[in-house]
Image: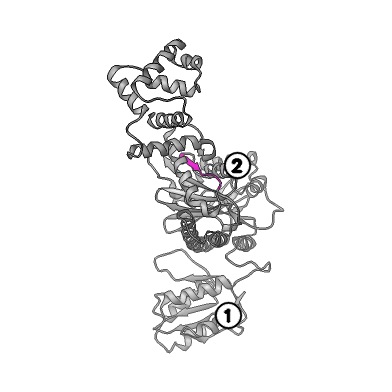
Amino acid sequence: MLRLDRLVNVLGGYGARLCCAPASRDVELRSVVVHDPTDARPATGEVFLAVGVDSAAEAVRLARAARAVAMLVRVSPPLDEAVLAEAVGAGIAVLLVEPEVSWSQLSGVVYGLVLEGRETDAGRGPTDLFAFADTLADEVGSAVTIEDQMSRVLAYSGSQQTADPARLETILGRRVPDAVRRLFEGKGVFAHLATSDEPLFVGPSPEHGLRGRMVVAVRAGRELLGSIWVECERPLPERHRTVLGDGARAVALHLLRSRVSADLERQVESDLVIRLLEGTADAHAVITRLGLLRGRFRVIALQAHIAEERHAAVLLAFERATTGFGWSRPGRSTLFGNTLYTLLPCGNDVTPALDWLAAMVRVLPRQVTVLAGVGGAADPAQLPSCRQEADESLALRAARPGGGVAVVYDESWDEILLQRLRAAASAGRVPSRGPVADLTRHDAEHGTRHIATLRAWLEAQGDLAAAAERLGVHPNTVRYRLRRMAEITDLRLDVPEKRLAMIIALAVGRP
């Protein structure tokens, strides 16, 4: 826990001079508040930054209103003795900031000292929202839950002795139950959170196991980041509402800091995954840096659409795929173009990849359509080839109307092979002459059915009766056509290599 004495000592090296202090400098500092003249809402915190305040007397007045125990102000020295006496009487330490020191740098130092240096008895710092939920619950005298904008639980206070069934189910399921969420939606709770910063009371609902709730939005500017819920049977008194409003601003700061940290982690992770997918000589070292165990992996290529808007939800999918600490997620992901690639350790068993995709579909909004391709099992050095297989599987899934979420390379390698051969053919990389080409031209010029007959005979593996049944003709007709085909081109059906080449040519040429 940061104490006033340490704050004074550290800030002295940054150009902030202590002018007066209460009798004891052992007072603990837990929060920071910055003066914002555009925000009429009262804000409280132990350390008050009087940014933009030109009068020391006005700064002391604002610091008292914020219930601060330390104040930083930048005005011309010396400070009036009466002002300093007023500050001492209010128990406020005054630190005078030198003109050369920027507020942005100083605020960064103060936030770092106060927030990162604070710990609870359990050894948890402020970056742990659970510790903050415990503190807030103590101040309002009731259980607290902190949720994100999708009603998923981010943290909750420790005591569950008076928890109602809805709270217990929320905590166990890590999100608000669907029935309770529909109740809140019907009562206009979410509409209120979207537009207002005022706490709202939601009355009890015994049929939903709900005692009642007081809720306030957690917002950064106009963006709704989440909400704080307090379990209560009746509206909170005004002083507790003020505490709840201050708590919402503190949680917003935490979530913004977490978002910045998460964005940096995502960027590092994304860069490493791209190196693996494009090929690198130190693949095993990169795998280790990603925190993955050595073994075999699969690459999942995913695209997400909303109605006719192509790739409208791919950023949302990337955010969901990279939510949480790396060690708590099975895979590592990157966003490349309009495709989300996830590297998943699952080896020869494709089940973990399909389970991962099912989980992704569940956390995305219902209107999002997910298409995916899963590459074959690969060693780290083979991941570029695995990515190609995932891309080709995704393209195959996109070409299929309906069907499941994903195409798996293991199950569709034959179709993918034919797609590769067709691509080669379209680039002019297959012979333009030969039995298949000759018979195709003859059919076009004379209206014969030699190609259909050849395909049926090859698919029936030389069985005349089976080929005839496929064509709906007599076996003698098939025999006659084969003789005529041998007169047109060098067929040589008795040579295995020739038969294989014709099967490939027919498969490539099939639309």
**Residue 477 sits in quarter:** top left
Q: Residue at x 41, y 18 (%)?
A: 482
Inter-mark Cα distance, 2 to 1: 55 Å
* Disc 2 residue type (three-letter): Thr
Residue closer to the observer: 468 or 369: 468
Q: Relative to 369, is 24 on the left or the right?
A: right
Tell me how the rendering is colored: one colour
Q: Residue at x 49, y 70 (%)?
A: 33
Q: Provide residue 467's location: percent of width, then percent of height.
A: 47, 17
* Disc 1 residue type (three-letter): Leu
Query: Is residue 63 in view from this perspective?
Result: no
Stretch in magenta: 367-377
Q: Quadrant of the C terminus?
A: top left
Q: Which residue is mark 2?
A: 351
Q: Provide residue 313's location: percent of width, then percent of height.
A: 43, 45
Q: Which residue is mark 1?
A: 4
Residue 196: which numbered mark, if any?
A: none
